[in-house]
Amino acid sequence: MWRYRSWDVPQIPAETPQTQKAITKSGLQHLAPPLPAPGAPCSEPERQIRSTVDWSESATYGEHIWFETNVSGDFCYVGEQYCVAKMLKSVPRRKCAACKIVVHTPCIAQLEKINFRCKPSFRESGSRNVREPTFVRHHWVHRRRQDGKCRHCGKGFQQKFTFHSKEIVAISCSWCKQAYHSKVSCFMLQQIEEPCSLGVHAAVVIPPTWILRARRPQNTLKASKKKKRASFKRKSSKKGPEEGRWKPFIIRPTPSPLMKPLLVFVNPKSGGNQGAKIIQSFLWYLNPRQVFDLSQGGPKEALEMYRKVHNLRILACGGDGTVGWILSTLDQLRLKPPPPVAILPLGTGNDLARTLNWGGGYTDEPVSKILSHVEEGNVVQLDRWDLRAEPNPEAGPEEREEGATDRLPLDVFNNYFSLGFDAHVTLEFHESREANPEKFNSRFRNKMFYAGTAFSDFLMGSSKDLAKHIRVVCDGTDLTPKIQDLKPQCIVFLNIPRYCAGTMPWGHPGEHHDFEPQRHDDGYLEVIGFTMTSLAALQVGGHGERLTQCREVVLTTSKAIPVQVDGEPCKLTASRIRIALRNQATMVQKAKRRSATPLHSDQQPVPEQLRIQVSRVSMHDYDALHYDKEQLKEASVPLGTVVVPGDSDLELCRAHIERLQQEPEGAGAMSPACQKLSAKWCFLDATTASRFYRIDRAQEHLNYVTEIAQDEIYILDPELLGASARPDLQTPTSPLPTSPCSPTPQSLPGDAAPPKGEELVEAAKRNDFCKLQELHRAGGDLMHRDGQSRTLLHHAVSTGSKEVVRYLLDHAPQEILDAVEENGETCLHQAAALGQRTICHYIVEAGASLMKTDQQGDTPRQRAEKAQDTELAAYLENRQHYQMIQREDQETAV
């Protein structure tokens, strides 16, 4: 009988040669009999702890990719017998991004002793591997926690999970994510030999069998062959250094019409820290050797290596600049056919991503669903435009200004080329950030600088004479007289419909009857002029003055003028600029996913009409509960009922929900007691993932109602109070414990008015715990704020009253933890800045967010560092990592 002995190395049945060979080739090598004790000397030299994929010839087969983690408890994957840090405290831990095991950093070397390697990302070449199977084997890993159901018996996994638990509940594969109960009746040795399907994303995963580690050519050649070798070197040198260079890895694909192999390029600098976290998620779902960090050398080498892979697709994770970088590299390599590029937008702006339906920025959509979107997306074309600038021979030397250049920052653009006011503001920001990068460490500061620069530039009128210094000829037609009549302060040559973080400067479809509809693949540019009035109206749905649509532009400037190319600014000397079509890039456009409709909708015809209950969720409840669907459903607030066509998308459904607020009271109308919807509400997907997640408003036309809802549709309203803050939703609780300084319930006057908020504030300021408790018993609102939006908890922290802080944490709604005052500080920011370690501990353990930033862009940890309290900063950093890892572990469920 095969059984587990707690967390010790499990025993297996008596091994036959065939069984032992199967175990060795699987991921369950650690099921083998115990090896020598931890104290035994290791013959191999200590290997480097890597956090990136090793592409050198010394790469180790099955090497883990380690990231720092703060998973609490004494859990270590090597087990008690081999753990060398089990008796120590505060030992750093690391987590493998590819197989999700966690070990103490000193125990990494012990993985060799239990013979546990990560999922292999390549295979060895050579004669001894000729008979190796071409299929991929499972990589089995023990799990203490597992979501879903056992593939064999269909029963769920017991979720008796604590951080100190040693019980193994499941065995799952790091490739296909299949999971079994960790008992012989569900997981049998026969399954070790089965080929792995690579899971639901097999079509985009590059199998490790395609990637071969080549052997370096031997130098033991006979003298008769030296001449041939020298001749070969001469020939290879003519081909260029890249073609004649030996590379340690080669790609030998096995083409299949059903496969769409994917290369993922991530810019970790985009979107704050989003890029770095996204990399870890892709390493888990894909082969680590198809995921590339662009800060480690760019995309060129990876594209060269995979250039012969049939049906290849690319996912660019970053801003529009990252996408342009990859497209320019594809131009240089001249791949035939060029692989289509999809976009995962990080950061802000992302106009190209919006145009191709990828949204304005990544929020919390599961990576698994993103991979499905990339696989199912439609291939479209994108015009790309050449920019050629040369000095204007008619402009004299006196026209050259200090700081001006005669070269454009880019010679090709995908989104737009502009000159005038917007370029001047961008240039001012760019130069200031280059001079003082430490002053531009938060989005709030950046936006404030942009606003200030735009206002000062408006007052100075630096671009008001733009029309006097330019001449524009489009397709042979001189537009200069029309431009001089308009007197624009900005001119934009636009390739895609979106501009300036989602605005539509050409106008919405159907608004421009004198011109052809705007497209990104028609070989035409849209030329638009902006006055200050139309620039201001652009942010509220307006548009500029439509000048023309053309295939070629000749722009002549007679003085130095600020310009920008896809957001890259410079001050260009008097020049003659020619714009012409360069080529068309192949892109992936996110498609409307009828295939993603839940099974309950696929099993029956789509009804003509759907009657669906609409419920609203607060941002606080969403942040706290979106990994627990049942609790979040209970915390939601019913709004009313809508009746929509069975095949309607979310865009149509939004219009019906908005009408709920205008309908008279009756069937379907919004309850009079409900707070009105804010302008920022969005839909939540409640069906296609193990948790709720937000849907970008720009992508609502891509999702059907039946894709995200069953009997009830959920929406997220960031301005709605949480359930704990609404008295009508609070459940009756037991009476508060009495204290010597508090009156009994009978002593309270029955008809007395509730205490004023100012009394509560004064009690908190004076550290008068008895008075505060008395006022609360008399009906005082613990969520009261003063004129500076400071809560009672802010005041209690400022006075250092631990007793009042504990009382507020125990009795005030949860919203008080992350409530911010006018300067953006939470109570945790304040406590960290004052070095109040005990109070910080109280607030953190109550569930406050450690990722929130104030108006300076600082987290509580950074406030503690500025206060030079290193111990408090270390504690807050530890808990901040724990919060991040907890969310990540809940998503991957391992």
Image: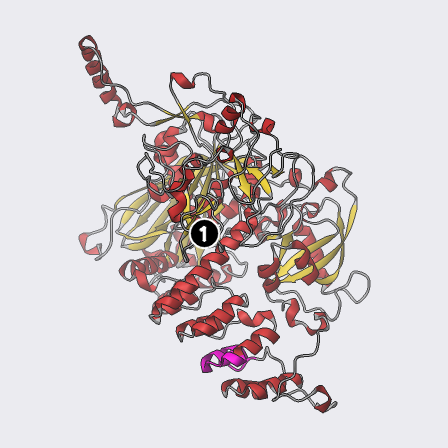
Assign a secondary structure to mark 1.
helix
Q: Position of residue 290 (x, y in %)?
A: 44, 35
Q: Quadrant of the C terminus?
A: top right
Quick check: 247 above or below 284?
above
Q: Nearer the viewer, residue 407 or 68?
A: 68
Q: Nearer the viewer, residue 535 or 880?
A: 880
Q: Nearer the viewer, residue 173 or 714?
A: 173
Is 429 displayed left or right of 520 in the figure? left
Residue at 57%, 60% (x, y): give it.
Answer: 623
Quick check: 891 above or below 208?
below
- The amino acid sitting under disc 1 is Gln
Q: Position of residue 319 (x, y in %)?
A: 43, 48
Badge 1: how crowded within 10 Å, few (<14), some, or many (20+)?
some
Q: Is residue 683 magenta?
A: no
Is 687 displayed left or right of 293 in the figure? right
The magenta stretch is 785-804
Name which quarter of the figure residue 177 lies in: top right
Q: Nearer the viewer, residue 116 or 819?
A: 116
Name which quarter of the figure residue 228 lies in: top left
Q: Position of residue 528 (x, y in %)?
A: 45, 51
Residue at 50%, 86% (x, y): give it.
Answer: 765
Check disc 1 and report the residue beneath it.
274
Q: Position of residue 832 (x, y in %)?
A: 42, 71
Quick check: 249 above or below 73?
above
Q: Is residue 404 in view?
A: yes
- Which residue lies most toward the top here? 224
Q: Quadrant of the N terminus?
A: top right
